[in-house]
Image: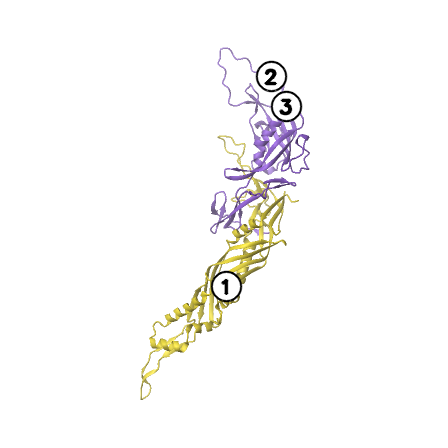
Chain colours: A yellow, B purple
Amino acid sequence: MPHARVIASEKAFERLFSKVVEKFVYEDADSADLGPFTAGYDIKIHLEGGSVDLRADNGVHVKELDIKWDRLNLSLGVNIPELCVGGFCIIPNPFGGCILRAPRYCLFSEDPDIQILLPLGGLITSEISIVDGELFTRYVVNQNRPGDMDQWDAQNAVPDPLFNKWQLVLDPRTVDVDFIDIADTVGDLLDDAIEALFDGLLSGVPDWAKALIKAILGPIVHLVRVILDIGDDIQEWLINLLGVTFGLQNMIGLALIAYFDIGNPLFEIEDPYPILPKAENPNNRPNETPLPELLPVKIPIRDLTVSNNDVEMVLEGNVG
Amino acid sequence: MFNYATKDVAEKPELLCRPIVAHPRLSQHGNPLVTIVKPFPLPGTDYGINFSVQLVDVKVDFHPGNTINLPSELQPLPEQRLAFGLTVCAGVGCPPDDVVDQLIPPPPEPNTEPSPQPEELTVIPADRLLCTCLDAFAVGGLRFREYWQQWYLEPFIDRIEIAEIRPEDLENGIECIIGTTFRLGFLPRLRVLLEDLTFNLTEQISLSLQPKPAGSSQIPNNPAVESDELKAFIDVDISVHDCPTGQHWDPDLQKCVDNVSESPEVR
């Protein structure tokens, strides 16, 4: 029988987990040339909620951990083949050449011609699941502590004690990031952005030229969608762009695994563990120089292990 | 932990009834092995004598009890109770007769005012203590108590018995002294404060637990002392302190403070 056992209910463990995970923040930005167009993203996420399911097989599952997009800006740069109108001859010169030509207007001479910024933060529903997590304990040696320093000197190190620590860590092992849905309104958002940009491009062009350009190009929204290869389902296209092309699902999943594994234990305790705090010297006398404080009473913790069943997490250890 | 003696005895620990085996680092850090107390007053005199009291052994046995052989008066160990086995050693520095003879006060000098009572007792030196050790047994339990808006898990005792001494009133008196000292002096030191335990998660983030005893009809005994175990059921509130980069949460100061460099490595 171990000397000490701490048991946390599934509910208590869930609260502990949620408090730790809510500090997870992931930010990233990148862009790529995808042939007919360029695309870039700028994201910042945090996580909320999540229901923890402790499993009888010692596993830990977390479902419905919502990804909250504090920022999800998608930029699309579309290059449209240059189009020029006008420049035709109004009054030809009978002896050759042209006396008067119509003005010539060229559009889409830049690359990219249209730079679309879509703020998708509030439109995407996504969540993370930890499918096969496992709890474990590890002993962390204070790196600043010299190898030959004993517990007494570590306790009295200045300016802070240099004690080692036991940590309880969740290894998520497998993380499933799911972009569940993008709101229908994203199509309107894209179309409105294209129309506005196009109107901007044509702002200095006379009406006859505008009519001519629109007659040649057809609906600009359709043209841009064709260039972007959006097809019938813009939601699917966006999820594919973000999740597969940019690999955001993988990156978010790996970031969460690293968050738990590298620097964020569920909790940690110092070793040896204080059971009585430092205290005033009982032999102090009034009006005399105070004597040194009593050292804290601490007990070494060894063999700390963790396990769980389907209703609770169990930490067990020995002292001495 | 529980060694009390007069100053003379503390300065000559070889006089103690039981030597104190302590790690040498305690002395290096200026920590005393003995708490100094005032001498035992001799009634009707201005003198006191040296003495010491040591709790030299403590054993604890949770219900059903199988390591401490309780005296018949305390058997059987009731449910939800634990047994204490104690060994208490006490010594008095009984002064030699010739020293006492020299201290016998003369009659008051005629026609003079009596000298005022001294503020401090004069300690009669002793080169050894008369020691006796008693085995005592107690039955008690554990309970949650709130002091100063904080919850503690604290032990208590119901009854104490020492080995049979005659006359019975003397036994009762000694049991009273040991029991009262145990209740007022020793047990309060064994309280476990369910204080805000703070666990550092990263340099910036720390986690505080605010525990309190769980109250539920599904928990008939809390704390429970059964099956050779002590079980305490606790509800916790969890809060996270998010400090700026370069700072960490100080639970004593209840605020973020600047870091001292520390970066652990995994073994």
Residue A82, quarter of the rendered image: bottom left
Question: Residue A218, image x and y in percent?
Answer: 41, 76
Q: Residue furthest top?
A: B110
Question: Residue B267, image x and y in percent?
Answer: 60, 51
Which residue is under mark 3? B170
Distance, label 1 to label 3, CA atoms, is 84 Å
Question: Residue B8, image x and y in percent?
Answer: 58, 27
Q: Residue at x 35, y 82 (%)?
A: A88
Dot 2 falls on which chain? B
Q: Is residue A85 left or right of residue B229?
A: left
Which residue is under mark 2? B101
Above-or-below relation of A58 to B32:
below
| Three-letter amino acid code of the residue under disc 2 | Asp
Label 1 secondary element: strand
Discs 1 and 2 share one subunit: no
Mark 1 or 3, closer to the camera: 1
Distance, label 3 to label 2, CA atoms, is 29 Å
Dot 3 falls on which chain? B
Q: Is residue B73 left or right of residue B208?
A: right
Mark 1 or 2, closer to the camera: 1
Label 3 secondary element: helix
| Three-letter amino acid code of the residue under disc 3 | Leu
Distance, label 1 to label 2, CA atoms, is 101 Å
Where residue A181 is drawn, which disc sits there?
A: 1
Mark 1: few/some/many CA within 10 Å (<14, 14-19, 20+): some
- Mark 1–mark 2 contact, CB under 8 Å? no
Mark 2: few/some/many CA within 10 Å (<14, 14-19, 20+): few
Residue B236, quarter of the rendered image: top right
| Three-letter amino acid code of the residue under disc 1 | Asp
Residue nearer the viewer, A159 or B248 = B248
Residue B212, quarter of the rendered image: top right
